[in-house]
Amino acid sequence: MASIEMTLPKMGESVMEGTILSWLKSVGDSIEEDESVLEVATDKVDTEIPSTHAGILKKILAEEGDIIQVGKPIAIIETLGDREEPLNIQPIEIAASEKQKGIIDIGQTMNEVSHDTSATSSHQRRFYSPLIRNIAKQEQIDLSEFQNIAGSGKEGRLNKQDVLNYLNSRKSQSNPIVNGIQKRSTNEMPLNKSGQNEIIVMDRMRKIISSRMIESKSISAHVTSFVEADMSTIVSWRNKLKEKFKTSSGQSLTFTPIIIEAVVKAIKDHPMINIQVQGDKIIKKSNINIGLAVALPSGNLIVPVIKNSGLLDLKSLVVAVNDLAHRARTNALNPDELKDGTFTVSNVGSFGNVMGTPIIVQPQVAIMAIGAIQKKPAVIETPEGDFIGIRHKMFLSHTYDHRVVDGSLGGRFVRSVADYLEKFDPNRPI
């Protein structure tokens, strides 16, 4: 027999650590290669980690609730081999910052969970991960209330999004009062009629987002250029085809993939937008990988990536956008779909905003915000003269890193995107 050290794999660009949510296997269990062994939460996604080898789970080195650095050992797997290979395993360095701060984390240890008196015999027949138990504990909900929720995880298991969807639809729920002050999560902020201040505790993802936004502002010199594009031709084309396309393909035809197509064309014209900075070097990326900012039901944000967008036609972009957005909102993305982005698009128009100044996703150097499409009076130039007409207008906000992208390039790029949108062929098929 040979002993293999299983380490925490890299789970996305800039992801340096993960929280052990639950072990799906116990010591002594047999494991097939690529079979899921444990569940891990990162700032980007919750995911199951597969085994790198077939064999027997000999030893678990990381407890549920521990925060483990990428590349650190988490288990020993005993595999078939000619001889025993000795291992020199260093103690796992658990990130202690969260525990020292006294912050309640949704990935706390099993010892803490085992004291949860809400785990009664009526629901012990259904498995609840430490993550689910801690959500129930924080929301002061008995686990028996989760019995009738259909789980979307493996073998019908409840995952975080299943529970969050249930809580969002649950109209009446109590909130704890601590020292006379009502405590609420960041997902729920009603008006306070008592005159008292509220303490809003950030969830794990919100704390990470906060850190990343500050980090990006400190790294990149943010500058934004604005262009207003005439979307009238595209609006008319989409209105004409959207129902037929929905019937034939089962896909919704939105404006986002059409705009992404224009962004890709503009990147091909201005490849120095598709770069990254590494020290004093500029890395020109060969692939165009478009990140799509998606707002989650929790109010947090995630950015899945459409890989090799430059090779996709419009129909393929429609399918990719719909698929990634849906799976982002249902917590079904895998880590590979959250890395290697080279340019990001954020549709602030979906919130009714006409423009925005988004923060760059590191290590990219540019991001574009899409505003709401509005009907406006506009001067229309014709061979017979100018006249006033109603046009569908939309602002594009292009934020870029002034360390490596000057105003000339940043401005010409966003103008190029608008030009492609305004020159859209109204007779093109899809």
Image (spheres, rainbow, N blue to C red):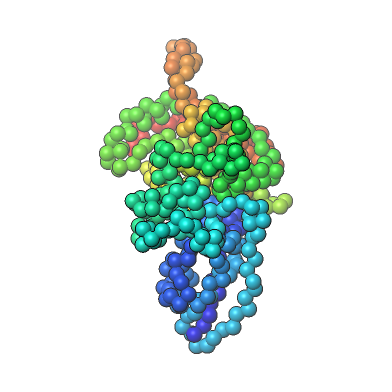
> Camera-side residue: 349 or 207?
207
Q: Is residue 338 visible?
A: no
The residue positioned farthest toward the right in the image shown: 280
Relative to residue 278, is residue 76 drawn left or right? Answer: left
Residue 54 sits in which quadrant? bottom left
Q: Residue at x 69, y 39 (%)?
A: 221
Relative to residue 190, is residue 172 drawn left or right? Answer: left
Relative to residue 179, is residue 333 drawn left or right? Answer: left
Residue 42 sits in which quadrant? bottom right
Q: Residue at x 49, y 36 (%)?
A: 347
Q: Residue at x 27, y 41 (%)?
A: 248
Q: Residue at x 65, y 66 (%)?
A: 93
In the rendered view, tell whether residue 383 sits above or below residue 77: above
Residue 237 sits in which quadrant? top left
Percent of width and height locating residue 45: 50, 53
Figure label count: 0
In the rendered view, tell whether residue 33 sits above or below residue 210: below
Q: Can you say which quadrant of the picture contains the C terminus?
A: top left
Percent of width and height locating residue 18: 56, 59
> Camera-side residue: 235 or 421?
235
In the rendered view, tell whether residue 282 sits above or below residue 59: above
Q: Is residue 196 visible?
A: yes
> Camera-side residue: 50 or 140?
140
Percent of width and height locating residue 155: 35, 60
Percent of width and height locating residue 79: 48, 80
